[in-house]
Image: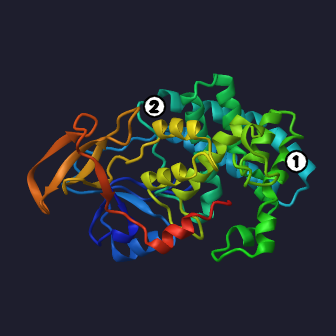
């Protein structure tokens, strides 16, 4: 299978991987030949990437970090939590979350188990996510990234569990922010930005009253927008004053956001997201934690078309667990011509060969929009 942008799809191309909704229901089955109408519909749904089948990518099979059942149950738990809160008061929301607390812990334990058992680096491209479902999938993805990072940093299983719960609920304060603001496609006014910046404190107030959840989880919500140079919010604390769990979730939160569709910004690919993270190392984010994060994430996902420094075009076919920047690739073009017999190159062994580009790039204007980190 080949990973392609929906904006480069052609009528007649065959879908390689089912496109599902947030309930796990299949919207478009694998093997279906795309029509112009279907492609337009995918764009309307704000789906950025899908997998297609073609001769050059035959035999390439991307794997998922989570089992389908884990993913479906997790999304349903998150939807239930956010949906049940509605217009309730902060105290009532705390009682509701207490009732759901055991479900969250079970969900995070299942995620932890799937991450531990996975032989691959994590790839969570939002290929089926429209911005109307962004909050649910984002919360799940942040939890997965945070757990994986905590594992790489040698946190205990109990610590990983706490980080995961805090990550899953880090945005719970948004339940008291107007959806008109959260879904606004244009630049926010100063007043609207002030309103958005209230959600960490709101989340802290909700979670600290939950007897079923650790108070550390509340601080994860409170501090996930703080930055180590003191330029974050809501308190502008810096360095060691920020809880290590919140530093982890801050990285997972931003990376998950920029590699997903948001109403005001298109998704970027993981390698572009990682470049963005390292640009903030030492000022916004802890460098040691970003370095640990890079070891856990598939920078170049399986199926992605890449350009090598010698001009050859290739498809990513396999990740290296601790060095996802140098995957195994299948060469499909040389000197701008298709090769008669595709062959493989292990970039982890041929160190003079590097990936310099991909077939999916953003315009300068789109890249500026990606920097809108706030939520």
Drawn side of residue 337 relative to residue 144, left or right: left
Pinpoint residue 130: horizontal percent, then vertical percent: 55, 64
Q: Quadrant of residue 145?
A: top right
Does label 2 or label 1 sit earlier along the sequence?
2
Q: Is residue 355 above or below residue 319?
A: below
Q: Nearer the viewer, residue 312 or 21?
A: 312
Crowding around mark 2 (Cα neighbors within 10 Å: few <14, some 14 to 19, many 20+) is some
Of helix, strand and loop, which one carries label 2? loop
Q: Quadrant of residue 269?
A: bottom left
Pinpoint residue 82: horizontal percent, then vertical percent: 74, 53
Q: Is residue 261 above or below residue 185?
A: above
Drawn side of residue 130 relative to residue 169, left or right: left
Q: Residue at x 61, y 59 (%)?
A: 134
Q: Is residue 266 visible?
A: yes
Q: Nearer the viewer, residue 4 or 110?
A: 4
Describe the colour scheme in one phrase. Answer: rainbow
Q: The C terminus lies in which quarter of the figure?
A: bottom right
Of helix, strand and loop, which one carries label 1? helix
Q: Nearer the viewer, mark 2 or mark 1?
A: 1
Drawn side of residue 73 relative to residue 33, left or right: right
Residue marked by disc 1: 205
Q: Is residue 178 visible?
A: no
Residue marked by disc 2: 118
Extreme residue toward the left, this view: 340
Pinpoint residue 373: horizontal percent, then vertical percent: 63, 60
Q: Quadrant of residue 173?
A: bottom right
Pinpoint residue 158: horizontal percent, then vertical percent: 68, 24
Q: Residue at x 43, y 37 (%)?
A: 121
């Amino acid at each position: 299978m080949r990973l392609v942008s929906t904006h480069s799809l052609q009528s007649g191309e065959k879908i390689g991987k089912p496109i599902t909704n947030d309930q796990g229901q299949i919207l478009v089955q694998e093997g279906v030949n795309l029509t112009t109408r279907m492609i337009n519909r995918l764009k309307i749904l704000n789906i950025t990437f899908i997998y297609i089948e073609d001769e050059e990518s035959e035999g390439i099979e991307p794997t998922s970090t989570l089992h389908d059942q884990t993913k479906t149950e997790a999304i349903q738990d998150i939807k239930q939590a956010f949906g049940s809160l509605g217009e309730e008061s902060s105290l009532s929301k705390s009682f509701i979350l207490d009732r759901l607390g055991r479900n969250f812990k079970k969900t995070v334990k299942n995620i932890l188990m799937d991450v531990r058992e996975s032989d691959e680096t994590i790839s969570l491209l939002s290929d089926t996510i429209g911005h109307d479902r962004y909050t649910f999938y984002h919360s799940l993805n942040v939890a997965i990234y945070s757990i994986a990072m905590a594992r790489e940093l040698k946190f205990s299983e109990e610590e990983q569990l706490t980080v995961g719960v805090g990550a899953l609920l880090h945005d719970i304060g948004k339940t008291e922010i107007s959806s008109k603001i959260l879904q606004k496609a244009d630049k926010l006014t100063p007043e609207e930005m002030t309103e958005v910046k209230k959600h960490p404190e709101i989340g802290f107030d909700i979670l600290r009253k939950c007897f079923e959840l650790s108070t550390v989880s509340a601080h994860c919500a409170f501090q996930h927008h703080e930055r180590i140079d003191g330029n974050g919010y809501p308190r502008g604390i810096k360095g060691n004053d920020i809880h290590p769990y919140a530093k982890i979730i801050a990285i997972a939160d931003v990376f998950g956001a920029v590699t997903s569709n948001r109403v005001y910004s298109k998704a970027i690919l993981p390698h572009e997201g990682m470049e963005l993270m390292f640009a903030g190392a030492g000022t916004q984010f802890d460098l040691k934690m970003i370095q640990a994060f890079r070891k856990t994430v598939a920078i170049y996902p399986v199926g992605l078309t890449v350009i090598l420094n010698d001009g050859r075009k290739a498809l990513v076919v396999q990740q290296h667990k601790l060095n996802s920047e140098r995957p195994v690739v299948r060469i499909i073009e040389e000197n701008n011509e298709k090769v008669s017999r595709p062959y493989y190159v292990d970039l982890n062994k041929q160190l003079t060969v590097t990936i310099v580009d991909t077939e999916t790039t953003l315009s300068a204007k789109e890249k500026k929009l990606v920097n809108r980190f706030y939520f």
